Image (cartoon, helix red, strand yellow):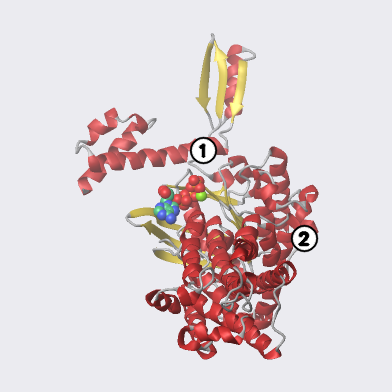
């Protein structure tokens, strides 16, 4: 209820690079102790958002508070409470893993034990290897180690597991869970939706610089998008039926056909829901572009635009509206 | 808001924890870290650290046959080629260790993401500067020690015994190396990328060495070139070092017929202050491109 419970607050955030609008008004809050995932396709604006929160980039508009501070004016005590893992880091690395972690540990008032961090990122055997001689995934683990060494209150992770092997990823998940138990607030971007589902309490989907959806991972997407699908084979043909009551549908099938062949009840995965959200946003954006650049007849566009996909009526409606405004 | 009363004691406590003591402590720890990295980079080791020693050796050996510098018509007297080149090489080492080393190094750190990462930590910019300056001091002292050692052992150069000469050496060195290090930090802003850093910084530094009396005897340069060189700090460092290592009789060929140490001090101080101002105004962890 007080601003003390909110670790990150973003109000109507916009960012333009020259004439290009990378963020078109994004609003969300992250509570203390929460793990929050930002999802979205390449170029959606995830890194732009996260680097504005870290103080690396200046926003063009809107209000931002990170641990109660405007990141454009964050001082050293503020930075001491943050942990940052950037999307890309390509240092030459003429120091060993242990030397680098020790150097960074010294900068924080209440840092973690270096050996503990080395163990947590699974680099015990490489602790005395120079960072430039590590593999890509191992270097990425050092990035994560440097992000957590200062025992941050708020941890930013921009695609932290890029290049991780499956085992390293599981180990990373364990690390994140232990940070969560300590009460660390975490903002994560990732293209691995299983990772978002595993780790985050809530997620936001960003596409084209806008927030498309936000909520607990299990409740993303429209209610219809999350309706399970019953699939079976009947007279050699695969049939599907969306049903809020899949049990009843299956019971009906059994009554009608006996044991149905190749029976499946599928719940849409986060990936399915995500793709639907992002595709819908893309189709709308394309339709807007088409309306602004080519024709004035919305119906023609809807008829010829394959990207309109499953919902041509919606697309043509949007297009027409845009035309009227223009 | 009731939160204000809660946060203010915490804030003042943390402000104290982030004071000058911490800046110095972190700066000291960075000196060790930076110096370690310096000696792990084989290219800087060659082009910055060993370069003056190599040049001293080459020039001393190559021109040995030309006899002594400043000798009498009958070939007696004067000083050896190595002794004549030594002060210039010390001056060049001071310039290389500061301007060239830091200019290239920091430009590379800016483009490879090192500075971006540091900018996200609670490391004070001043501690970072301390680390770089300390690295420059440590490595240049070793470099000069090596130069003197080679000059004495390999070429039989005799060093000054007058303590006053060594006092002059101390202040010219300290002023020279501080100026050079600060200018290195300042110049690191110029290259747009780490890859272009050597191409942007090494040529002017090399030209300066040619016109400032390092490789070519300063008094033999045309007047207008001497004037151009006098704008830049290397000429003054070299002049100060000549006053330490060359016999008094050589003062007569200097511009104005004397070592003019007062001008050395003033010129270097002006550059030092200018460099500090440039660093203060222009240094950023990253370019906020937009
Ligand atoms: N410095 C910049 N100058 C100009 N345009 C930029 C800059 N940084 C990002 N952009 C543009 O802003 C948009 C958003 O970029 P951003 O890096 O935030 O995407 P992202 O969601 O992190 O993508 P990815 O998943 O690929 O990391 C992109 O279209 C990108 O081209
Ligand atoms: Mg990104």
Tag of residue A307: none
Q: Earlier in the sequence, mark 1 or mark 2?
A: 2
Q: Nearer the viewer, residue B92 or A274?
A: B92
Chain of the residue under label 1: A
**CA gap, disc 1 to disc 2?**
40 Å
> Relative to A156, is B33 on the left or the right?
right
Q: Quadrant of residue B289?
A: bottom left
Report the front residue among A158 and B58. B58
Query: Given the image, what chain letter belongs to the residue carrying mark 2?
Result: A
Residue A130 at what x, y percent from top left? 72, 52
Badges 1 and 2: C-beta atoms under 8 Å apart? no
> With A142 as the anchor, is A116 left or right in this view?
right
Residue A217, x across and y down, in percent: 58, 46
Give the residue number, with chain letter if any, for mark 1.
A273
Residue A107 visible here: no
Q: Is residue B252 above or below residue A250?
A: below
Residue at image position (55%, 79%) is B237
């Amino acid at each position: 209820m007080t601003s003390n419970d909110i670790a990150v607050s973003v109000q109507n955030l916009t960012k333009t690079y020259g004439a290009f609008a990378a963020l078109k008004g994004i609003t969300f809050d992250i509570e203390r102790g929460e793990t929050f995932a930002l999802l979205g396709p390449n170029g959606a604006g995830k890194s732009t958002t996260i680097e504005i929160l870290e103080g690396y980039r200046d926003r063009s508009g809107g209000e931002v508070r990170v641990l109660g501070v405007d990141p454009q004016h964050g001082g050293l005590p503020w930075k001491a409470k943050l942990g940052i893992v950037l999307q890309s880091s390509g240092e030459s690395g003429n120091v060993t893993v242990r030397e680098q972690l020790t150097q960074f540990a010294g900068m924080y008032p209440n840092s973690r034990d270096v050996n503990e961090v080395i163990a947590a990122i699974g680099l015990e055997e490489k602790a005395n290897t120079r960072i430039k001689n590590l593999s890509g995934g191992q270097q990425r683990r050092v990035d994560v180690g440097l992000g957590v060494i200062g025992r941050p209150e708020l941890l930013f992770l921009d695609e932290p597991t890029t290049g991780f092997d499956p085992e390293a990823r599981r180990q990373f998940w364990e690390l994140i869970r232990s940070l969560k138990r300590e009460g660390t607030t975490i903002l994560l971007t990732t293209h691995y939706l299983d990772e978002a589902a595993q780790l985050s309490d809530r997620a936001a989907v960003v596409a084209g610089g806008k927030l498309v959806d936000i909520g607990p991972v299990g409740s993303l997407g429209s209610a219809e998008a999350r309706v399970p699908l019953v699939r079976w084979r009947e007279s050699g043909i695969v049939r599907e039926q969306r049903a809020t009551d899949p049990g009843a549908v299956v019971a009906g099938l059994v009554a009608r056909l006996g044991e149905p062949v190749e029976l499946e009840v599928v719940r849409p995965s986060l990936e399915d829901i995500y793709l639907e959200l992002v595709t819908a946003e893309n189709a709308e954006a394309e339709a807007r572009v088409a309306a602004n650049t080519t024709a004035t007849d919305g119906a023609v566009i809807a008829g010829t635009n394959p990207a309109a996909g499953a919902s041509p009526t919606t697309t043509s409606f949007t297009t027409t509206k845009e035309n009227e405004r223009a | 808001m009731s939160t204000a009363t809660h946060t203010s004691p915490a804030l003042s406590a943390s402000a104290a924890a982030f004071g000058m003591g911490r800046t110095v402590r972190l700066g000291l720890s960075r000196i060790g870290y930076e110096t370690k990295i310096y000696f792990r980079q084989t290219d800087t080791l060659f082009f910055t650290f060993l370069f003056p020693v190599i040049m001293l050796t080459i020039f001393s050996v190559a021109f040995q046959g030309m006899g002594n510098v400043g000798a009498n018509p009958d070939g007696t007297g004067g000083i050896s080629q190595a002794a004549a080149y030594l002060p210039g090489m010390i001056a060049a080492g001071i310039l290389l260790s500061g301007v060239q080393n830091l200019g290239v190094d920091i430009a590379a750190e800016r483009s490879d993401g090192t500075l971006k990462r540091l900018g996200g930590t609670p490391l004070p910019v001043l501690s970072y500067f301390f680390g770089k300056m300390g690295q420059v001091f440590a490595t240049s002292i070793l470099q000069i020690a090596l130069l003197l050692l080679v000059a004495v052992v390999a070429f039989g150069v005799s060093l000054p015994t007058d303590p006053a000469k060594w006092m002059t050496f101390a202040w010219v060195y300290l002023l020279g190396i501080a100026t050079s290090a600060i200018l290195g930090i300042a110049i690191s802003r110029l290259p747009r990328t780490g890859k272009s850093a050597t191409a942007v910084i090494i040529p002017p530094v090399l030209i300066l060495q040619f016109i400032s009396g390092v490789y070519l005897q300063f008094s033999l340069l045309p007047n207008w070139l001497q004037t151009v060189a006098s704008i830049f700090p290397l000429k003054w460092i070299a002049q100060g070092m000549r006053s330490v290592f060359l016999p008094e009789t050589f003062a007569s060929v200097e511009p104005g017929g004397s070592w003019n140490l007062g001008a050395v001090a003033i010129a270097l101080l002006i550059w030092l202050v200018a460099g500090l101002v440039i660093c203060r105004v222009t240094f950023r962890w990253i370019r906020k491109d937009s």
